[in-house]
Amino acid sequence: MRAAARRRRAQRRTAVAAVSTLVVLGALAAWILTAPGWPDVRDTFFSVHDFRASFPDVLRGFWLDVKLFVIVEAIVLVIGLSIALVRTTRTPALFPFRAIAVVFCDVMRGVPTILLVYLVGFGVLALSLKGLPTDPLVLGGAALALSYSAYVAEVYRSGIDSVHPTQMAGALALGLTRVQAMRHVIVPQAVRRVIPPLLNDFIALQKDVALISILGPAEAFRIAQIDAASNFVYTPLVSVALLYLCVTIPLARLVDHLQARSRRSRGGAVAL
Amino acid sequence: MSDVVLEVRGVTKAYGERPVLRGIDLAVREHGAIALIGASGSGKSTLLRCIDLLEDIDDGDVLLDGAVITDPSVDPIEVRRRLGMVFQAFNLFPHMTVLQNLVLAPVRAQGVGRLEAEERARELLTRFGLAGREHDFPDRLSGGQQQRVAIARALATRPRALLLDEITSALDPELVGEILQLVADLKGEGMTMLIATHEMGFAREVADEVCFLHDGAIVERGDPEHMFGSPEHPETQRFLRRLLDAGRL
């Protein structure tokens, strides 16, 4: 009896959700498709022909984005952890480094990433110092690395702070040095805990790689922009957006999955 | 007294204005065990943490095998390598397997070869009824098993003395017995121990001397017969009376 009622209620809920979704999406589609400018928008943004014509170039440019993303991310993970470790030490001798790390994080997180790309990309170039790189790809990557290292350092630091002090006491009591305790006991636990927020920063960085287009390298957005400007079509930009989604949506699902898993494991008996 | 392993002389400590240790004196002889009893906040844990140099003392000395270890010139790392400490909350490393927990310190802090350390670890685990659990993570074990791992981990470094900080307080009552039996066995084998405990029956059975702490001072000490049979200090009497009323004695 009760099971049947529950089943009926579940069916009714599903039906309501389906109808509601159809109505809302239908109204939205009708609203856009009946807009006076829709035919023009369709031709400039969603032209199959333009899509076919521009896609190979855009894809090649996107490959550059992905490569740059992977390299910058690797650098960010190392620098971010180093900054976080410097900020959590208590050795008096390291005070100046601690101060630098604090200022670095504040400044790099406080300045818009696009400004950093401008300042590093054009500023360093203008210095014409021997030995400094002049490749816009390197300079743009450096600007992104600076910006994201600051964010990632804070993520690592929150992870390190979240490891209970009894873990440090346990490690020290065994005769480990502070450095050994950090390396073998604290940091491994901290990193495990911050993997989901780190991946969130991954996604943001993956998108921000497009900012280096302002320095000139032929990455996806740049190529699409040139294409759009010369042919008055915006379809190439839409194809760039689709390529980004192909990378960022799987990453986002991975974050959800990992977060759900860490919630489950925290709910269980985790001995500290 | 050449056979004194651990000696505490006039140790004082305050957190800000609040004194937590007011001139503690005690000496643990080789193969001996001293039990520290007293209410929560009486200073038992703080004293153990000070002896293991996890906290600084304000005044006084702690000596290990006749040498002062609380002098600022002494390397605390080196001292901690010679002492073993077991905590109330186990403090096992949750990201490491049981075996990794046991070999970390011997390999990293003492330079023992990995194979040798693992062999010693397996011996300890087998002895503590944990054979076959080497590759489990701590959260797969019961509280009693986790605490046995923690004791094994402390013993893996072959410490000169063991400091036990209320090691049964976080355990379900039915698991307390197995841990206390294990500590009694260690005592039987000649391990030198300083034990902070709420288990009076255990203190009575295992300790050679019982020290009652009240407000950061040892107000009464003696052999277990005397301390539990005919305590003289009114605070000791009151403390034991309270435990008796609570059915804990």
Image (tube, coloured by chain):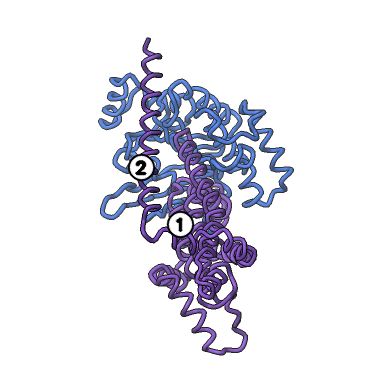
Chain colours: A purple, B blue
| Kind of residue indicated by mark 1 | Val
| Kind of residue indicated by mark 2 | Val
Note whether B180 is above or below B196 in the view shown: above
Marks 2,1: beta carbons within 8 A: no
In the drawing, what numbered circle is on residue A155? 1
Badge 1: residue crowd in 10 Å (few <14, some 14–19, many ≥20):
many
- Give the total number of marks visible in the rendering: 2
Q: Nearer the viewer, residue A68 or A38?
A: A38
The location of residue A107, given as percent across then percent down, is 40, 72
Badge 2 or badge 1: first in the primary sequence = 2
Task: State the residue at coordinates (61%, 37%).
Answer: B98
Residue B73: tell me if it is visible.
Answer: no
In the drawing, what numbered circle is on residue A24? 2
Task: State the residue at coordinates (44%, 44%).
Answer: B48
Residue A194: tell me if it is visible.
Answer: yes
* Res A10 quadrant in image: top left
Note whether B36 is above or below B61 in the view shown: above
In the drawing, what numbered circle is on residue B135? none
